[in-house]
Amino acid sequence: MKYAAFIQYHRDPEKIQAVRPAHREYLAGLKEKGKLWASGPFTDDSGALIIYEAESEAEARSLLENDPFYEAGVFATWDLRPWRQVF
């Protein structure tokens, strides 16, 4: 099942830039394992949308909480919801 995470960042551009390489490396690893369907920042860099492929909400939450951005405090708020792809 897919889970969409709507994420808002803390407004700290220096921290975002410093942690972004580790964040993207983490997401690339998830993609290789089939645990990431799509991800990317909003065009104003205020946050991001990440769509995980997970067996449960608990697994999706774990994927989010193990993200270097989460661990570094870049994620100010997030909302995780089950998501059904239609097209």
Image (cartoon, rainbow, N blue to C red):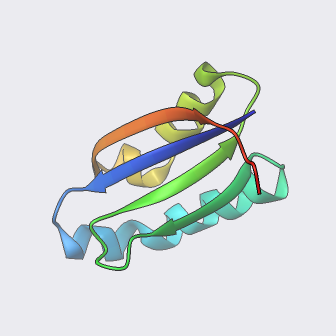
Q: In this picture, is 80 found above or below 6?
A: above
Question: In the visual, does 60 lie left or right of 48?
Answer: right
Quadrant holding the C terminus: bottom right
Seen from the viewer's position, the closer of residues 83 and 42 is 83
Q: In this picture, is 41 found above or below 49?
A: below
Seen from the viewer's position, the closer of residues 50 and 81 is 81
Q: Residue at x 21, y 75 (%)?
A: 13
Expressed as whole percent of the image width and height from the top left, the position of residue 70 reads 39, 46
Expressed as whole percent of the image width and height from the top left, the position of residue 58 reads 59, 20
Seen from the viewer's position, the closer of residues 47 and 30 is 47
Q: How many marks?
A: 0
Q: Residue at x 52, y 65 (%)?
A: 22
Expressed as whole percent of the image width and height from the top left, the position of residue 3 reads 61, 38
Expressed as whole percent of the image width and height from the top left, the position of residue 36 reads 71, 52
- For this orientation, the residue located farthest to the right is 33
Quadrant holding the N terminus: top right
Question: In the visual, does 23 lie left or right of 60?
Answer: left
Where residue 60 sits, quadrant-wise, is top right
- For this orientation, the residue located farthest to the left is 11
Question: In the visual, does 27 lie left or right of 35?
Answer: left
Q: Residue at x 29, y 53 (%)?
A: 8
Q: Residue at x 42, y 61 (%)?
A: 48
Q: In this picture, is 55 found above or below 41?
A: above
Q: In this picture, is 16 found above or below 51?
A: below
Where residue 32 sits, quadrant-wise, is bottom right
Seen from the viewer's position, the closer of residues 30 and 81 is 81
